[in-house]
Image (cartoon, coloured by chain):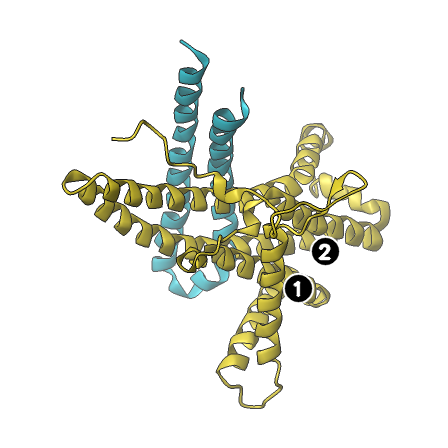
Chain colours: A yellow, B cyan
Amino acid sequence: MAAEGSGIDPMHQFLVEPVMGHRLVMQGYDISFTNSALFMVITAALLWLFMLGGMQRKLVPGRWQAAVEGMTGFVQDMMRTNVGPEGKKFVPYIFSLFMFLLFANLVGLFPLAVVGLHPFAVTSHISLTAILAFFSFGMVLVVGFWRHGLHFFSLFVPHGTPWYIAIIVTPIELMSFLVRPFSLGLRLFVAMTAGHILLDVFASFVVQGLNAGPGIGWVVSFFSFLMIVGVSALELLVAAIQAYVFALLTSLYLNDAVNLH
Amino acid sequence: MDLASAKVIGAGLAAIGIGMAAIGVGNVFGSFLDGALRNPGAADGQQGRLFIGFAAAELLGLIAFVVAILILFVVK
């Protein structure tokens, strides 16, 4: 048997490296076109094709148009229930956010390794999810101060709080407000990272079990393979749920800014 | 105990938190089903709240996972 832990390197799949192999350095900054950027472009292109095929304005929608309209209707419903009639203005942003994250999560799970390409999940890096989370947070701040001015600070004092409780509650509310972008970005990034590590570990079990020869090794391989099938199904679910949760929480935070109490 | 062993033990202990979050997430969905089966008509309107509770419970487990990863790969 191989030495403990050797051969399993689940973090290698998250390595950001230039696509063509050579780095492009300008003024001391590395501006190479990386695999992360490549998969973001692929995600955006797929999303563009999906929307292009569906925006046909037919009275009786075909399958494709019905799929696109289902997605837009889903986001519109979410904004209407969470923000109210004012939420219609934010539907384009939330829709772009939700669809990009959904497609990025699903593209990251796509079994490209079967044809020899190295798949890469862009949402498994906090550099992407944190930026999107800060976009959402910044939008909440801009909308909040735009609509309510300095009155926006009353968000931290829940309505009808006695002053002696407000002394305790206000710092807590402020903390929970400031931690929002971090929790928003961290949730998506860690959920995707954890799932991909899990898949990689079980895939390594399959290979190492097969290499160990007939007997107990093949049994391990077989059950690991069953686990991969199960975990992949779970990851498809997680990919959709995490994109939905990101959009849902953004819409809730926007609701705070739009309808202050 | 040397640092390498302590790191692995610490990461294992941090992983307990993920199991605790599993209890929390199960509680969220279990309680939702409990209520939804009593009053199926009101269930659809509460799906947003269901996922907010799920997100809050899951985040704490994911932080435990982050701690485990930090201990394993970042602590020198």
Q: x and y percent of residue A23 in the render?
A: 67, 45
Q: Amino acid at mark 1?
A: Gly
Question: Is label 1 in contact with label 2 (beta carbons under 8 Å)?
Answer: yes
Residue under the image location 37 percent in, 44 percent down: B26
SS category of the residue bearing label 2: loop
Residue topped by disc 2: A259
The answer for which chain carries disc 2 is: A
Q: x and y percent of residue B41 in the render?
A: 42, 66
Residue A116 lies in quadrant? bottom left
Q: Is residue A78 above or below residue A188?
A: below
Residue A175 lies in quadrant? top right
In the displayed image of the protein, which residue is found farthest to the front?
A22
Residue under the image location 66 percent in, 48 percent down: A133
Residue A187 appears in the figure: yes
Residue topped by disc 1: A84
Q: x and y percent of residue A176 in the render?
A: 65, 37
Q: x and y percent of residue A210 in the render?
A: 24, 44
Tell me the quarter of the image containing the N terminus of chain A.
top left
